[in-house]
Image (spheres, rainbow, N blue to C red):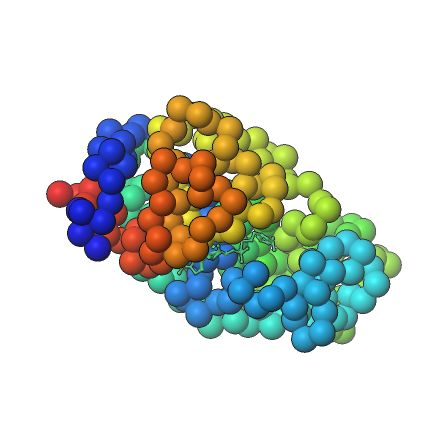
Amino acid sequence: MTQKSFSSVFLASLKSARFVFVLTGAGMSAESGLPTFRGVDGYWQNHRVQDLASPQGFARDPLTVWRWYNERIRAYSGAQPNAGHYAPAQLEALVPDMTIATQTVDSLHARAGSKNVLELHGHLREARCTGCGVTLPLANGLDESLIDHSCGERFRPQVVWFGESLPQDVWSRAESAAARADVILVVGTSAQVYPAAALALQNDRAFIAEINPDATGLSDRCDCVIREGAAVALPAIVELLRL
Ligand code: APR
């Protein structure tokens, strides 16, 4: 992508920005070979993803929920950050203050070197007992024999499920970073899940750019839309900032 691929106002806004806020979703990891949520028509085997990723689904069938997460954990550990992950890590060094708020739980932003990452929907690096709070590392998933804890409760993944609140400290940090942003990049999210999607809408002063091959519910609210994949657009933006 060349300078002509981007609006001059966008590049000027980014070059002069003091605060940059980046909201990312599953599309960030598409080029790492990880399927997006809505790209797999919302089903895993014959289960609706929204049922598996819910307290009710876990209470009803913890074994199936863990089998779904164990498959994702194995996919995540085999995946590598892509150029779209490395670019924000480089962008952090080019702007005074940058925050990434991600809806992904694959840890690929951190593995690419990003320092200031807010995991809005949690992560899959460890499981937590719902009774006593003890945690277990999830490097290779959770052995099915360990789901029930000796305290009488169960281990669950450290992710935010449908119907659950986001971690308060993470949410308030994301809200203040979005509110003070001069430029907001919305990358690889269908913007269908709130409150995460609202982060890009609460600041009417910022220049908002969407990077997504497809249109989303946020597209009309953006100052520019870049219909390209994250692994192509983000490195091109970083290169142009360096000029
Ligand atoms: N680069 C950028 N965007 C891409 C790419 C790519 N290479 N490939 C796909 N996309 C876009 C898709 O067009 C889509 O708009 O990424 C978006 C992925 O959307 P979803 O699958 O809905 O994922 P996401 O927005 O992260 O979902 C939000 O929903 O299921 C819950 O908790 C889950 O965090 C997730 C939340």
Identify the residue at the far front of this view. Answer: 220
Q: Residue at x 31, y 28 (%)?
A: 18
Viewer-side residue, 149 vs 39: 39
Q: Residue at x 52, y 71 (%)?
A: 75
In the displayed structure, would residue 153 be above or below residue 201?
A: below
Number of numbered markers:
0
Where is residue 185 drawn, in percent x and y?
A: 39, 41
Q: Residue at x 44, y 70 (%)?
A: 33
Residue 234 can be seen in this image: yes
Where is residue 123 drawn, in percent x and y?
A: 57, 54
Viewer-side residue, 129 vs 76: 76
The C terminus lies in which quarter of the figure?
A: top left
Quadrant of the rendered image containing residue 84 = bottom left
In the rendered structure, the answer to whether residue 216 lies left or right of residue 37 reads left
Residue 20 can be seen in this image: no
In the displayed structure, would residue 189 be above or below residue 178?
A: below
Where is residue 241 drawn, in percent x and y?
A: 20, 42
Identify the residue at the far right of this view. Answer: 152
Viewer-side residue, 239 vs 39: 39
The N terminus lies in which quarter of the figure?
A: bottom left
In the displayed structure, would residue 7 be above or below residue 144?
A: above
In the rendered structure, the answer to whether residue 162 lies left or right of residue 89 reads right
In the displayed structure, would residue 212 be above or below residue 179?
A: below
Where is residue 183 drawn, in percent x and y?
A: 35, 33
Viewer-side residue, 158 vs 192: 192
